[in-house]
Image: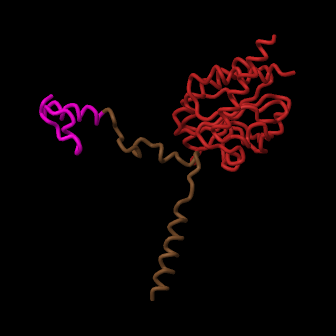
Chain colours: A red, B brown
């Protein structure tokens, strides 16, 4: 039990240190900024506050960004494995032309929510400095983990971080 | 006259500073296109360089810096 909690602490500490080095001090531990997301394929507009009580994985991506394409299979896998455990995933598109995003989504199908439209204000509010950038937000709406970029090796750490939030009562 | 010149230079300087607007990470789509790379086709360039070096029998002979000694 002690070993597990120490392991969880070390993950949190490592992520916090990496985020501090990347200049994410303001975002980490702060409340997630309020954004309105137009979800593709629906007429719904989601609000960040709507996800209170659920863990939320927010990923800022663009069609021209090669690591973003790598992150899509990971997010599909995460949705498949943890989707029923009170986790929501929103991939926020940052393409300047929506046609580029639609073309990307045809070749990279997503089984999670994708926010299309004008999202620059939201990205600024989150302090996005790299593409892709992902934010793991806890059930109370606080940003707990921040990741810049995406490599296949990151999958295990990201999954662990999301799972650590889901274990929180 | 000198004053006008200085004022003109100052205005030109200020105007040129306006061109230094930061580009947000999500606005770099065009910069990320392959044709924006310094070397748009590195594999092709490497092959061409290899052929050239073999023909000249001088490693580094395809660049301005390396004249090649002809000893390889």
* The residue stretch that appears in magenta: B44-72
Residue A90 seen from this side: no
Q: Which residue: 49% across, 73% down?
A: B12
Quadrant that contains the N terminus of chain A:
top right
Relative to the observer, which residue lies in front, A156 or A9?
A9
Would residue B68 appear left or right of A161 to someone viewing this image? left
- Tell me which corner region of the image, top left, top right, bottom left or bottom right, holds residue A71: top right
Residue A66 coordinates in the image, percent (x, y): 51, 34
Of B5 and A145, nearer the camera is: B5
Q: Residue at x 72, y 22 (%)?
A: A10
Q: Per the image, is A156 magenta?
A: no
Please state the total of marks drawn on the protein image. Answer: 0
Q: Quadrant of residue A79?
A: top right
Q: In this rendering, is residue A38 above or below A84? A: below
Rendered-image quadrant of the C terminus of chain A: top right
Front residue of this view, candidates A28 and A69: A28
Q: Residue A18's spot in the image, x, y percent?
A: 65, 32
Q: Would residue A79 appear left or right of A98 to someone viewing this image? A: right
In the image, is residue A157 above or below residue A97?
Answer: above
Give me the residue at 22% from left, 31% from top: B50
């Amino acid at each position: 039990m002690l070993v597990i909690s120490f392991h969880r602490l070390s993950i949190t500490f490592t992520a916090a240190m990496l985020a501090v080095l990347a200049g994410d001090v303001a975002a980490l531990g702060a409340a997630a900024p309020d954004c309105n997301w137009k979800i593709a394929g629906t007429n719904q507009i989601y609000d960040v506050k709507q996800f209170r009580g659920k863990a939320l994985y927010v990923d800022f991506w663009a069609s021209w960004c090669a690591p973003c394409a790598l992150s899509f299979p990971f997010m599909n896998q995460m949705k498949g494995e943890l989707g029923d455990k009170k986790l929501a995933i929103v991939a926020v598109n940052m393409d300047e032309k929506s046609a580029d995003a639609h073309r990307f989504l045809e070749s990279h199908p997503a089984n999670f929510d994708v926010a299309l439209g004008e999202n620059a204000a939201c990205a600024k509010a989150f302090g996005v400095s790299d593409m892709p950038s992902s934010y793991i937000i806890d059930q109370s709406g606080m940003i707990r983990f921040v990741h810049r970029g995406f490599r296949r090796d990151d999958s295990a750490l990201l999954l662990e971080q999301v799972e650590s939030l889901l274990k929180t009562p | 006259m000198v004053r006008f010149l200085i004022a003109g230079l100052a205005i030109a300087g200020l105007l040129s500073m306006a061109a230094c607007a930061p580009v947000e990470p999500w606005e770099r789509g065009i910069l990320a296109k392959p044709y924006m790379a310094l070397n748009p086709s590195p594999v092709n360039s490497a092959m061409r360089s290899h052929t050239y070096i073999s023909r000249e029998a001088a490693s580094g002979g395809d660049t301005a810096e390396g004249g090649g000694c002809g000893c390889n």
